[in-house]
Image (cartoon, helix red, strand yellow):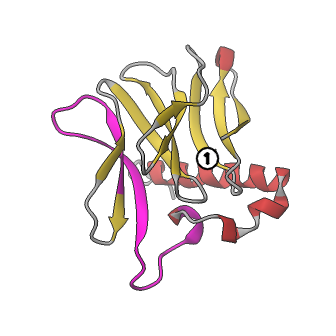
Amino acid sequence: MLTPRSLPRAFVHLRVAALTALLAACAPDVANDRSRGSDATTRGAPAAGEKWKLVYATEVPGRQGLDIFVVDVPGGTPRRVAGVAGRNDFSPSWSPGGRSIVFRRNPARGDEGEIMVVDAARLKTRNLTRSPRVADWSPVWHPAGASIAFLSFPGGRGDIWLMRA
């Protein structure tokens, strides 16, 4: 049963499941190859004693907007990898190789989101969509890592798009 408290988690799982199903239909040989993926969402729970990296978005006290952080689990110290004051960075997703993170960046007010990617080691950020006044949402890496699926709403009509990473 969905409750207001469980809705955000349910939405994330439904979004990932829907995009994973789409990618499986487009490239079943790649989507079913788990050896190419290394993020926590595709691996399930880590084995006892295994460390893994968690990527998440959160507010920082005293700063407007959401930033993207990475932390080693268990026991790591969070490290900010993306964030611009006055903007919201959220919906992060690891690349299959664990080197890059794709995420959505939008203004503090408004829905005109851009799809961005950041190199997790060098902290270099690139805008992948460059689509002003268009809402781009929910980026997810293709299991092979060569492309990214996302939702886009040009003219108010939503579609799933696939672009090179």
Which residue is labeled 1 in the image?
Answer: 140
Residue 71 in the magenta stretch? The answer is no
Task: Kindly give the residue lying farthest to the bottom in the view shown.
Answer: 48
Tell me what residue is drawn at x 34 percent, y 59 percent.
71
Apparent side of residue 83 relative to residue 30 in the rendered image (left or right): left
**Amino acid under disc 1:** Val
Q: Is residue 52 left or right of residue 139?
A: left
Q: Is residue 36 above or below residue 106?
A: below
Residue at horizontal 15 percent and vertical 33 percent from the top? 62
Circle 1 crowding by C-alpha within 10 Å: few under 14, some 14–19, many from 20:
many
- In the displayed structure, 147 sits above or below 97; it is above
Whether residue 66 sits left or right of residue 64 in the image: it is: right
Start and end of the magenta stretch?
41-70
* Residue 162, horizontal then vertical, whole percent: 73, 38
Check the picture and name the quadrant holding the C terminus. Answer: top right
Relative placement, left or right, of 49 versus 161 is: left
Element type where label 1 sits in the image: strand
Is residue 53 highlighted in magenta? yes
Q: Nearest the camera: 101 or 40? A: 101
Q: Is residue 130 above or below residue 90?
A: above
State the residue at coordinates (67%, 14%).
155
Residue 22's spot in the image, x, y percent? 76, 49
Q: From this view, report whether residue 85 is shown above or below residue 155.
A: below
Which residue appears farthest toward the front when viewing the image? 122
In the image as oriented, which residue stretches furthest toward the left?
Answer: 62
**Which picture quadrant has residue 97?**
bottom right
| Residue 43 x/y as whole percent | 57, 70
- Seen at 43% across and 54% down, the residue is 6
User: Is 107 in front, or is 101?
Assistant: 101
Q: Position of residue 126 (x, y in %)?
A: 52, 32
